[in-house]
């Protein structure tokens, strides 16, 4: 009797079968995992947007025949962005001034912007003017009797303010017959509050 250490064909078949089953099981696990990954359904939600820039417009006007500011968007308001396009206050209320005079004209501001504006009054320059120069008439802007102060105008707000020209009671004779140059009254609207 000889003993053989080589496996029998039955054993070999059993081992091959076990290895084959193990390999098939491994492939099946990998296949199921791959199938689960590649078979996922997806959907998306997309959004788009645009933007526009607003506008900044401070308009000026004189009062209507009743002495009131026209309503916003009335057509009476002017884009007066520079001196050449300034709203002209008629001379009549301020002509033939005499000592101790005070005369007032109401002007109107309208915020036609897309946002609120901080509206300031620039300094009025009268140096060397034949009427408003040294010792001469005084020009100022008032808001209800008080000197105009920077304020915020909401969108479509209309603001009446008064231009007041006054002369000293002891106005010198040398001013008689004088005629002033155009005096700029400039309001600046800014989005910085």
Image: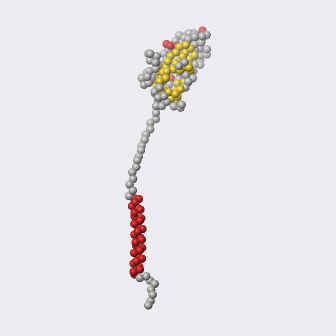
Q: Position of residue 125 (x, y in %)?
A: 57, 21
For the point 40% across and 49% down, the residue is 44
Depth check, front residue: 176 or 75 = 75
For the point 44% across and 17% down, the residue is 64
Residue 181 visible in image: no
In this image, 39 relative to 119: left or right? left
User: Based on the displayed image, in which of its 4 quarters is residue 18 positioned?
Assistant: bottom left
Q: Classify the position of the C terminus by image quarter.
A: top right
For the point 43% across and 41% down, the residue is 49
Q: Where is residue 187 in the image (x, y as percent from the top left)?
A: 52, 24
Residue 71 visible in image: yes
Depth check, front residue: 190 or 96 = 190
Q: Where is residue 2 in the image (x, y as percent from the top left)?
A: 44, 89
187 w.r.t. 171: above or below: below
Q: Classify the position of the N terminus by image quarter.
A: bottom left
User: Tag count in the figure?
Assistant: 0
For the point 38% across and 54% down, the residue is 41
Colour option used: secondary structure
148 w.r.t. 50: above or below: above
Q: Position of residue 58 (x, y in %)?
A: 48, 26
User: Based on the displayed image, in which of its 4 quarters is residue 34 positioned?
Assistant: bottom left
Q: Please, which residue is most extreme toward the bottom here?
A: 1
Depth check, front residue: 31 or 172 = 31
């Amino acid at each position: 009797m000889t003993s053989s250490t080589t496996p029998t064909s039955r054993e070999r078949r059993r081992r091959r079968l076990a290895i084959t089953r193990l390999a098939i099981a491994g492939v099946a696990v990998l296949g199921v995992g791959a199938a689960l990954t590649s078979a996922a359904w997806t959907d998306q939600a997309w959004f788009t947007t645009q933007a526009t820039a607003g506008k900044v417009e401070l308009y000026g006007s004189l009062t209507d025949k009743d002495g009131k500011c026209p309503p916003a968007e009335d057509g009476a308001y002017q884009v007066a962005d520079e001196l050449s396009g300034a709203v002209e206050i008629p001379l009549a209320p301020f002509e033939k001034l005499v000592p101790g005079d005070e005369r007032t004209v109401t002007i109107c501001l309208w915020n036609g912007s897309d946002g609120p504006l901080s509206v300031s009054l620039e300094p009025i320059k009268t140096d060397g003017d034949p009427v408003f120069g040294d010792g001469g008439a005084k020009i100022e802007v008032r808001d209800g009797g008080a000197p105009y102060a920077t304020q915020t105008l909401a969108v479509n707000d209309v603001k009446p303010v008064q231009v007041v020209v006054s002369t000293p009671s002891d106005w010198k004779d040398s001013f008689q017959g004088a005629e002033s140059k155009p005096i700029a009254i400039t309001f600046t609207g800014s989005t910085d509050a």
